[in-house]
Amino acid sequence: MSGNSSRTALVLGGGGPVGGAWLTGVLAGLADAGIGLHRADVVIGTSAGAIFGSRLACGQPPRELYERQLAGDDRITLDVTTARTLRFLWAALGSRDPEHSVRRLGRAALGASTAPRSEMYDAVRTLLCGATDWPAKALRIAAVDALSGEVRAFDADTKADLVDAVAASCAVPLIWPPVALDGRRWIDGGSRSTANIQLAGGYDRVLAVVPIPHAVGPHPSAQQQAARLAAGGAAVSLVRPDRTDRRAMGRDMTANARVPAAARAGYARATALAAGVADVWLG
């Protein structure tokens, strides 16, 4: 399809505070290059992408998202201990079967001692910067059922409040508690896919910004998911960190000291890729 008949989806992946900072740099760099992200018919967010996707859909400009990262205005602290990290890896890597792997992680999350629910919700509300109501623009927030491993996209037509949906998408297993919604308990939307690009199925043009291309465990990568959409006829642009970006981001995606450098790296990456992205996004 071409022209005004094309339906566009902007997919924003997860990646913790550092990955989220890189993502905002990409969004700002693309916007500054003249790529109108407001053209998106839907914004699909996972984890950190759910936070920044919500703010973007609610009208916060990409440049403001980016500058807040440079200034350190969106910082949070996650209590990621060695013991929690090892238990997370044991659960996620304990099976080569994707369904079994994500259910193992869900069970570990349900049985874990985590930060209080109130602390998680305070952090989410702070990061949303006042975006507490579903916007007029279509917005879908991905979370994973802790028991079944099913991925669900919450939106304005579901019974979930925006804050609840984003909290569910950000409920990092073993760090933050699962979120109870619609009779189920939900964990981080990135538990089996860091971007959930498959949720953009049916859209003609897809721009996916993915700070971490692979989830922990035997799950499809962002590149594999993008290739499947492309095989179905969609025009897909996948933006992910290169080696220089990864050096700027470091290994610890919760390290607030890395946030400004990660944001700048994302901006530079977007500037370098803008022409190719425009070919897909603008047609």
Image (cartoon, grey):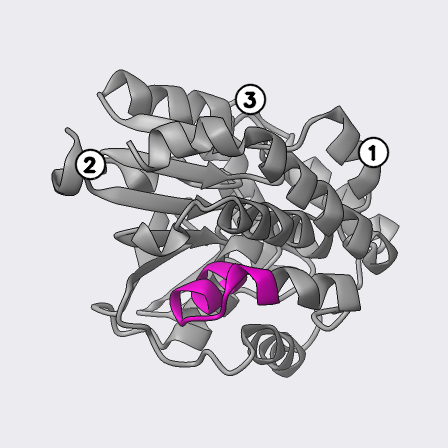
Which numbered disc, 3 or 2, marks the residue closer to the eye? 2
Name the one closer to the observer, 163 or 83.
Answer: 163
- Which is more N-terminal, label 2 or label 3? 3
Cα distance between the residues tagged 3 and 2? 29 Å
Q: Specify start and end residues of the magenta stretch as a single range.
A: 51-64
Q: Which mark is residue 154?
A: none
Please name the residue that numbered disc 1 is placed on.
247
183 left or right of 119? left
Amino acid at circle 2: Gly
**In the image, is residue 225 above or below residue 257?**
above
Q: Secondary structure at mark 1?
A: helix
Percent coordinates x, y for residue 193 in the rendering: 49, 38
Please name the residue that numbered disc 2 is placed on.
202
**In the image, is residue 170 above or below residue 7?**
below
Of the 4 image quadrants, the one containing the N terminus is top left
What is the crowding at mark 1: few (fewer than 14 residues within 10 Å), some, or many (at least 20)?
Answer: few
> Are the residues flagged by discs 3 and 2 in contact, CB closer than 8 Å?
no
Please name the residue that numbered disc 3 is placed on.
96
- Which is more N-terminal, label 2 or label 1? 2
What is the crowding at mark 2: few (fewer than 14 residues within 10 Å), some, or many (at least 20)?
Answer: some
Q: Residue at x 42, y 29 (%)?
A: 237
